[in-house]
Amino acid sequence: MERIDIKKGIHKYSDQPRCFYLGERNQNRFIYKYMDLEAAIISLATDSIRFVEPHQWEDQYESRFYNASYTQVNNAAGNTPPVLACCFSYASVNEAAWKLYSHTKTGLGARCVKIKINKKAFRKQLVSHNSDYQLYEGEVDYSLDDYQINHLHKRQYPNGTANSRHDELFADFDLASYLSLMLIKRQAFLHEQELRYFMIPNFPDLKGSIEHEEFNIEWKRILTDIVVDEHCTDTELAMLIKVLESKGIDIVPKREFIYAMPGAPIVIES
């Protein structure tokens, strides 16, 4: 199997200031944000979207390298800044996401919403409305197994063999190394096809204390479609429609019946 480079190069978007991408540029025109209905209503009503520091993520593996100590790594000073992140999918259909974002929640939080976003317009909104930050975009890397992730910070594996992955990331450590670590995710989540956005502030001394930030965006300029899960009631759907109308967004959300089969039971022909 061909080896995939874990360290991704940083490249600048030529048409947008303070906007960069890691590794191969994702060519999808649209991305999808899953959230519960309560969060969606708040986000739309306030023209904002929440980014969080990686230590807030539920999966501890994903904050493993954000919380790590880099004191023994050459060139780490200045290259491990605070990061605020938001996760999207470039897959238009993601069955697991419908369950994940409403799991164990009640009320409006028990309903999931999928928002379809124009990717280029979204980048423009983030950088134009939030001048104290630089934006980085990258596809999540699912190529490492759990054993490799668990030992990535070590020069050698337990059997004494050299860990070339360690050298790849830490021998010539820079911001690209650091953000590449923020893109590593376990193979169990490969189905998510996740695209991550990182906002890095100009104030580097607040790592671990920012927690989250509500970034200003104009949803009217980036939202192209919105669907809700099939269990959403008429009243809940009406609440969402009212918010969209109040923001001048001419989109009527529909229910997505992810398990439905059209028509009557089929007959197999002879």
Image (cartoon, helix red, strand yellow):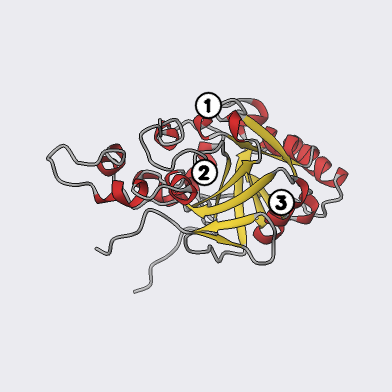
The image quadrant that residue 266 belongs to is bottom left
Tell me if residue 205 can be seen. yes
Q: Which residue is mark 3?
A: 127
Residue 80 rendering spot, x and y as whole percentages: 50, 39
Name which residue lies at 67% across and 54% down: 18
The foreground one among 268 and 123 is 123
Q: Is residue 233 visible?
A: no
Whether label 2 touches label 3, CB < 8 Å: no
SS at badge 2: helix
Secondary element at image label 3: helix
Residue lying farthest to the left in this orientation:
159
Name the quadrant of the C terminus: bottom left
Q: Is residue 3 left or right of residue 214?
A: left
Residue denoted by label 1: 104
User: Mark 2 vs mark 3: which is more N-terminal?
Assistant: 2
* Structural distance between the alpha carbons of marks 2 and 1: 14 Å
Q: Tell me what residue is drawn at x 48 percent, y 64 percent.
A: 24
For badge 2, the amino acid type reads Ala
Q: Identify which amino acid the numbered label 1 is placed on.
A: Thr
Q: Residues within 10 Å of mark 3 (few under 14, many from 20)?
A: many
- Closest to the camera, between mark 2 and mark 3, is 3
Q: Which residue is mark 2?
A: 97
Q: Position of residue 60 (x, y in %)?
A: 42, 31
> Which quadrant is home to the N terminus?
bottom left
